[in-house]
Image (tube, rainbow, N blue to C red):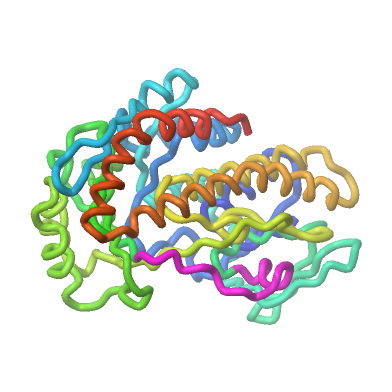
Amino acid sequence: MLVVGAGIGGLTAFVALRAAGVDAAVFEQAEQAGATLVGGGFHIWPNGVKALRELGLDETARGVGARIERTEYHSYRGRKLAQWPVGEIARSLDAFDVGIGRAELLAMLLGAAGAEQIQSGAKLVDFDDDGYGVTARFADGREERGDALVGADGLRSVVRAKLLGAAEPDYVGYVQWQTLIEAADQLLPDGVERVTFGPGSRAVMHHVSGGRLFWACVLYGPASDGGRPPGRKARLLELFRGWPEPIATAIEATPEEQINGLPVFDRKPVATWGRGRVTLLGDAAHPMTTNTSQGGNQAIEDGVLLGRMLKGVQGNPSATLRAYEQRRIARTTPLVQNSRFISNLNAWRDPVRVLLRDNLYAVVLGRKALKDQRKAVAAPL
């Protein structure tokens, strides 16, 4: 089986497929697999932890992460809107919550995969499914053949474009400025994730390993605002000064060259991801906004389920791939839609609507949203 893309989903799928006894190879277009130019972190929820447990990686994730015990929601005016006891919920599910750096998560998966197994510098340009197998063609002229092909090649997936058409992903209206800062364990209480909402803006913070702090500041506006423009630190300080600490302090403590602005995209859910011996996973299949911190978790779930379902499959795997897709589409579609709905609410700027949203969040986050979150992180894979 050919896996195209060595990001979170592709590496998880590769590890899961090998654990299931499936002969697999993984191809990554970057010259160095696991290298990331974007500092950042993930919240690994109990559903992600339990998926990693199937691969024997849950305790490794605990060791390279920082525990999260509660998620606090605040208004930029200082009002506390709600608090989720995420650590308690996780323990009730025989799991845990951790904040983990992007580099550490990729390194953990690379270690499980075996870095020497990754074929780097392999940019997919085309593939053919002749009914008996799939031939992948790469920019350097090489060809590889396997029983099936998994497109884990990200937001602008070459595999997806050939299967479903070359439509651009949907810009959701905001740029997420993010990084990790060193020696910041005192800026935020231990075990806390804090989310703060403002007019057309949002800030998120939680710890990762090594006393570091992940922070992300969201600003709604053109996608062209992102990247690494000069003066970005001063602009963020101007916009977020006066918000509850430690937001401004964290920005001030960050060298400007370490701040990256990522325009955020998603896609409308579709009824099928694949055809014949080819399927998708991760951002190639179901990119979602960052509002619920489930994107990485769902990519992990994709990879683990794919390996589980293909275990022992002989001959043409097409029917199994369609069954995998339908299970994952049913799981990810409401998560994509809910995350986009929250994104639209967070875009509000008018003071009256912002106050209305704060009042809405104060009620909904502590009741229905918390109930829905319990259900989402407890869903069996």
Name the quadrant containing residue 16. top right
Residue 157 x %, y %: 61, 68
18 to the left or right of 251: right
Question: Which segment is the magenta one?
Answer: 157-174
Q: Indicate yes or no whether the magenta region holds residue 371.
A: no
Name the quadrant containing residue 17. top right
Q: Indicate yes or no whether the magenta region holds residue 160.
A: yes
All told, the count of numbered labels is 0
Residue 257 x %, y %: 22, 69
58 to the left or right of 223: right
Q: Residue at x 16, y 46 (%)?
A: 183
371 to the left or right of 15: left
Q: Residue at x 35, y 78 (%)?
A: 224
Q: Please tell me which residue lies in front, 122 or 76.
A: 76
Residue 143 x %, y %: 74, 73
Name the quadrant containing residue 343. bottom left
146 to the left or right of 100: right
* Above or below, comparing residue 176 to residue 372 in the picture: below
Quadrant into which the C terminus falls = top right
Residue 199 seen by the camera: yes
* Above or below, comparing residue 329 to residue 175 in the picture: above
Quadrant into which the N terminus falls = bottom right
| Residue situated furthest front in the rendering | 352
Q: Please tell me which residue lies in front, 164 or 315.
A: 164
